[in-house]
Structure formats: structure tokens, C-alpha cells
Image (cartoon, grey):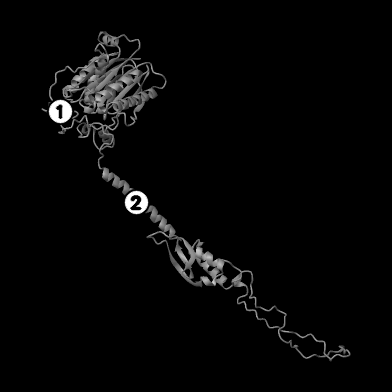
Amino acid sequence: MRLRYAALSDVGRVRRDNQDSGYAGPHLLVIADGVGGSARGDVASAETVEVLRRLDEPPGNDVLGALAGAIHLSHDRIAQLVAEDSELEGTSTTVTALVFDGQRIGVGHVGDSRGYLLRDGTLSQLTTDHTFVQSLVDEGRITEDEARVHPHRNLILRAVDGVHEPEPDVFTLEVALGDRILLCSDGASGSLTDAQLARILAEGSPDHAAVTLVTSALEAGSSDNVTVVVADLVGDDEVDDEETSAAALTGPMLVGAAAEGARARSPRGSAAGGRVRDTGELAPVGDGHDGSASAGGGRGAGDGADLDPEEARYAPQPPRRFGLLRRSLVLLVLLVAVAVIAVAAYRWSQDQYYVGDDGETVAVFRGIEADIPGLTTHRVEEPSSLRLDDLPDAYAREVTNGISASSLADARTIVARLERRALCPDPTSSASPSASPSGTASGTASPSASPSRTPGSTSTRTPGSTGSRTASPSASPSSSASTGTTGAPCTEAP
């Protein structure tokens, strides 16, 4: 397939300067709408087209990469121009560009110029406006009809300005024989409805459609520059008829501010490398003060402001509706989330228990052992009569540091063990060191009975002996050990 195209630009009936630029060639279609008013938006649009027109050749494999790269190069070019001339500060441009490889089309888009596709009588919009009112439409706050007359309809959120990265939308489009493509500045799309665009595009050749679109937009009251590029997808071997052959032979078409810039650079006063189509010679029908130019709700009409809306059109930081309310709601949601988490954490902490010291005594605490300003994280659940001084030093230190318990019952068990330990200071001994061992008599043993003789027994006397008898006295030694309950206090540790 190949493109059969036409391009046309008109300064309009209110503006003194044409800040739109357009280009149409065998492989490239471009619309750029300059923004900035006195900041010379025509320079931005013309330079952008000048950079992009280098893509008008059989594209390589990376069509979208080439498109995005060219838009970024135009961004760099504008930045360079502003650095060289401070009077250009604030200039910018929209851009919508299509690159055709014979089968598919790559699209790059920034701003509110538009691309449309007419297929089998049905018109569809290819691009999405980067505007404040479009964001309201996307959010369902206003309708498309309300967007046409919205007081902030002039505000665009993205443009090629040499300051902010342009972030273009890039995508591919499958096309077929018989498709018709329209690129236009908002001077046309803001004045004509989709139904009117579809009706005009459905008739005649690209050249006829371009002229009719511009004329219809002006008659509808457009107060802006109007620029259109129309192209048909035709067979590569299709022969142009008499009406289209002249356009086919002229090669690329350059219109609007880009054509004026080309004329200025050309020594012969004609556009270099492209045919110029600007209908600025059409007679104006109003001067912008009698209301005749505001009938269609065009840009800058009926706002009642002294400032030209074109100068305030590009706003990287547009005003937000209900901004304070939205921020307040976000803050409220965050506060509620934090409060819910805090309450859940506090409730969890109050289901915890540990054994610690309450001054000089041991007690069961409920909560967690932490110090948070303004918040009580623990309290005494059950006091006890056990004093820290009654415990061995090692156990006293454990209590001071806090002994975790899995439940209240577990905490009570720990306290009971500590009380038993208090009765046994030395965990390695089960009796007091002062206890006398069994079998060691203290004092004089007294025999359990008088010695008695039994038959067969003998009494032996040894010379010099005192006559003592051999007897087995049963001594009952008295023990001084006192242990209380045998072994119980000293067999368990907390």
C-alpha cells in the first residue's frame, strides 16, 4: 500500500499568526500546534516538523523507537533555541505523527492535536488528548459535550517544550486498503463534532476533504488556527485520477508555520522541499470582539479574560478540582489505617503476661514490658508477698529483667516456684549445714538395759581390769537438723 495525501493550514479569522505546522509525505504525516502566544509557538511547531520530517523515508524495523527518538530530538532542539534566545521562554508545541512502512502505521502523540481513522464509514479517534478536561472525561466527571465548553479546555498537560520530558504515546496501527486517516489541530476538532468530521471525510479526494474541513471549521466559528492532513491508503499499483495526480506529482507538502519558516530559509522565497498550502488569504468574518468568532466555543473566545488563552494554554501543573478535599481524604484514610493497626497491637499486648518486680516484691504483670510515652503498656495483674530480698541473687536478677509467661496460669506457676526457691537459698544442698549426721552420739550413751546373763555366757575378767562387762548399748543420738518438708523446696527451679 501507499499513501495518497493532502495538507492544508489556515491562520483563522481571529489570529494574526499561524502557530500550526503540518507535513505530509510518502512515509510521514505530522501535525504540530504551537503553544505559547507571544512566546512564539510557531517556532516550536516549525522546528518540531523540521526534525520529524527526516523520518519521511522507508522506515527500519523499529518504527516506534524512531518516532519516540525524533520527538525527543525536537525537545532538545527547542531547549537549544530557548537557551539562545530568552524571548522564546515558555514556547512549546503539540505533535501527532504517523510513520508508514507500507503495511502498518506507527503513531507518536503528545498534546491535544488528534488523529482519526475512517473505515467503512465509521470514524474512530486514534489518540487521547493530554488535557485537563480529558482527565475529567476519563474520570466520568464531565461528558464530551461539556468538555467542549469547559472553562479550562485550553489547558494541556503534556507538550514538547524543551523543559519537561515529552513522554509521547507510541503505538502501532493496523491499516487496510480504503482506510482514510485525518490528523488535525484542535482548531478543527474543537469546532466540528465527530459526526461532522465523519460526514466530510466520507466524500471526495483527500484534497477535497482537506479544503472542506478547514472551511467548515472556520464557518463553525473556530477562533484558532486550523490545520488538517488527510491521507488515503491505496494500492501501490493504483493509478491516480486527474484530481489526485497533481498532488501526487508535487511530493511532500509543508503547511503553516513550517512553510513560512521554509520560505524564509529559501533564497527564492518558496518552501524548500515541499509544496505550501496555506489559505490565510481567506477574508476574515470577525475581529474577535463582536462575538462572531466565539460562536463555536473556540479557543480564547467568550472567556472574558484580557490574557490571550493561547499564552496560558500549556500548564504542566494544572489546577486540580477538590485538591484540598482529596488530600484530606487521603490523610484521613492513612490515619484510620494507623489507628486500626495501633488498636490491634494494643489488644494483642494486653493478652501477654510476665513475672517482674513491683518495687520490692514479686508480681504477675499483664501486658508487655515496654515504656511508650503517653501509653500504659502493662499493669499488675496479681501481687504476691514474695520479696526480692528473699530470692537468691540469680533469681532476683531474672525477676528484675522480667520472666515471660505463656498465660496467667503459667505466670502463677512461676511465682509458686520462686516462693519454694526462697525457702532453699543453696540449690546444691537439701539440708542445713548445721545438721549432725545420724549415728554420731552427742553426750554419753546410755545402755538400753542392764546387762543380763544368759546360760552359756561367760564373763571374762582380765587381770588389771576394772571388771567392765562387754555389752552393745543401743545409743539414740539426738539430731539437730531441721529441714521442714523433706526435700520439697529445693528440688524445682522457676
Q: In the image, 467: left or right of 446?
A: right
What residue is at 45 percent from the left and 63 percent from the top?
A: 366
The percent position of residue 122, horizontal first and vertical second, equals 28, 23
Q: Can residue 7 be seen from the camera position used here? A: no
Marker count (numbered):
2
The percent position of residue 248, horizontal first and vertical second, equals 29, 11
Query: In this view of the protein, which residue sits in the foreground, 115 or 124?
Result: 115
Up the image or down, 136 lies above or below 377; here it is above
The percent position of residue 268, horizontal first and vertical second, equals 25, 11
The percent position of residue 400, horizontal first and vertical second, equals 50, 65
Q: In the image, 418: left or right of 217?
A: right
Kindly identify which residue carries mark 2. Answer: 336
Q: In the image, 208: left or right of 491?
A: left
What crowding class fits label 1: few (fewer than 14 Cα within 10 Å), some (14-19), or many (20 or more)?
many
Q: Quadrant of residue 230?
A: top left
Identity of the residue furthest to the left in this view: 290
Q: Can residue 267 be seen from the camera position used here? A: yes
Up the image or down, 333 lies above or below 416; here it is above
Name the secondary structure under disc 2. helix
- Image quadrant for the N terminus? top left
Name the secondary structure under disc 1. helix
Q: Quadrant of residue 166?
A: top left
Find residue 419 and name its label. none
Q: Report the amino acid beneath label 2.
A: Val
Alpha-carbon span between mark 1 and mark 2: 50 Å
Q: In the image, 193: left or right of 398?
A: left
- Marks 1 and 2, the one that precedes in the sequence: 1
Kindly identify which residue carries mark 1. Answer: 294
